[in-house]
Image (cartoon, rainbow, N blue to C red):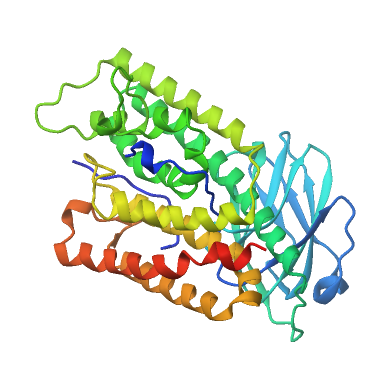
Amino acid sequence: MPGPTLPKISFPKKSAARKSLAVIAAAAAVPLVLSGCTDNAKPSGSSASAGPIQVTSTTTECKISATSAASGNLSFAVKNDGTEVTEFYLLAEDGLRIVGEVENIGPGLTRNLVVTASPGKYTTACKPGMQGDGIRSAFQVTDSGTKSTVDADFQKLVDTGVQQYTAYVKDQTEQLVTGTKAFADAYATGDSAKARDLYASTRMHWERIEPVAESFGDLDPKLDAREADLEPGQTWTGWHRAEEDLFPPTGYTALSAAERQALAAQLVADTEELGKRTRTVELSADKLGNGAKELLDEVARGKVTGEEETWSHTDLWDFQANVDGARIAFENLKPALTQKDAALATSLDEKFAALQAELKKHSKGYGFVYYNELKPADVQQLAALVDALGEPLSKLTSAVVL
């Protein structure tokens, strides 16, 4: 049976007891602090002499006047020369953590984004139509020789982390909606091969923000319930219903064309509703910290056991996405955590890196090997590293919540 194919990424169910009100955040290789997002921001710091970096967004292009800048305060002047409302993002190198964003730029308008950036590799993205993962390119921040000044006010660092994560939730949800529509179209029209290819990669957007998604108690069972989770009389819809139909076990009777179409339509409608609700979700530092731990618990309860993706065996895609979300939450809060408990921040860095290195051993192409191909020793090693990370991660919330 052909396996799912993923777009390029960085290497990087449920019973009632698995529901959570926690949330997660985006990932970065270096610490960054959002300085501001204004319509007429004036550049300052190491990049001030060159003026704002010009960004021109159209329907098909994201032109940037420079591919690098010196560390310090960076200013981007984003002009929309397209016909659709657009957004602009400065992302960490892995393309997940949102360093800064400016959104709702109408045709013909220009808005500025100002961020404080340390030396390192980044990704820029324009998102015409505010859908999908955007038109992306690499961006380098070189060392200006002047150490960036990070605001010493602890609460401001915490608030910045929450702000960055809120943008991350919105971005992942938008990508989930776009990906779900593509998956549902392939599934409904009988293109099972394409649907199988899209299944695991699209679900990663859900898994990265799973505690947020699960906080909507009526939507979560519609979208992500496994057959074993169903209540008496409950209609089974969502991803795992489609999973069984796409990766059928022996003796399975396939859904009819009409049944597929109905399931696909419901999946899109429920995902669009999720997108609407996440636009107004209110987040806080405790939800980021608790959400990081909840995501790791998801790994320990479902992904390590291989019970999440019963028929597709794409559990490692989910595993990676949950780890992404937990790591991202930590790194959004890391500037504040470092002020309070530098040793804990260092420990979390090391343990996330160890788990990620082990996951990478099982990568294949743009995805992973199937979970049923792992040896018992492989599973045991992954479980041990998850356990090792869980203990220090459980201390994150108490360390950053005043």
Q: Residue at x 31, y 15 (%)?
A: 259
Q: Residue at x 22, y 41 (%)?
A: 310
Q: Position of residue 87 (x, y in %)?
A: 70, 45
**Which quadrant: the N terminus?**
top left
Can see residue 92?
no
Where is residue 279 shown, x and y percent of the image?
64, 37
In this view, the residue in front, 177 or 66, is: 177
- Is residue 116 toward the left or the right of residue 295 in the image? right
Which residue is at 90% across, 54% downward?
Answer: 40
178 to 93, vertically: above or below: above
**Residue 338 location, quadrant:** bottom right
Compared with 136, 194 (above or below) is above
Q: Quadrant of the C terminus?
A: bottom right
Q: Is residue 349 left or right of residue 91?
A: left
301 lies above or below 393 = above
Q: Residue furthest top?
A: 258
User: Which residue, as the protein is rendered here, is positioned at the far bottom?
Assistant: 145
